[in-house]
Image (tube, rainbow, N blue to C red):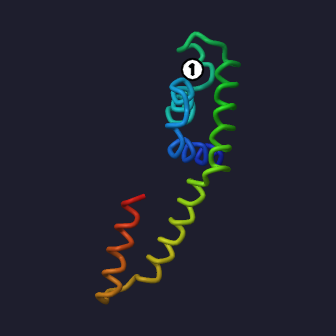
Amino acid sequence: MLEKTTRINFLYDFYQTLLTEKQRTYMQLYYLDDLSLGEIAEEYGVSRQAVYDNVRRTEAMLEDYELKLNLFSKFRNRMEIVEELEELFSGDDPTRTRARILISALKDHE
């Protein structure tokens, strides 16, 4: 479950601007604020089932966006490359120091 939650949180970060206000609100409350479906339903005066359906449909939309755009996948690949470069350029000589500075700059511009 934690792996799914982490993935959905990343997808939400990448694609939240493509969601409606209601979808963003429900996803934020459910995934980021860790409210239960019942708590969200009570807060908005809707049924628990309505919240559940909205969250599940939004999850499917996020997965569909990722399937088409691959932003999260490309991000993960870049991070793996950066980590490997950091390992290759560890050490104290000036070239390696400069390489680490450039790697940091790449990481900061994600």
Single out the residue that lies furthest toward the bottom.
Answer: 93
- Write down the quadrant of residue 109 in the picture: bottom left
Q: Residue at x 31, y 80 (%)?
A: 98
Q: Dot 1, how many residues are within 10 Å of its Cα: few (below 14), some (14-19), or many (20+)?
A: many
Q: Position of residue 37 (x, y in %)?
A: 62, 23
Report the amino acid beneath label 1.
Answer: Ile
Choose between 91 and 53: the one closer to the eye. 53
Choose between 53 and 20: the one closer to the eye. 20
94 displayed left or right of 32: left
Q: Residue at x 50, y 44 (%)?
A: 13
Q: Which residue is mark 1?
A: 40
Q: Residue at x 32, y 74 (%)?
A: 101
Disc 1, SS? helix
Single out the residue that lies furthest toward the top.
Answer: 45
86 displayed left or right of 71: left
Q: Position of residue 21 (x, y in %)?
A: 51, 25
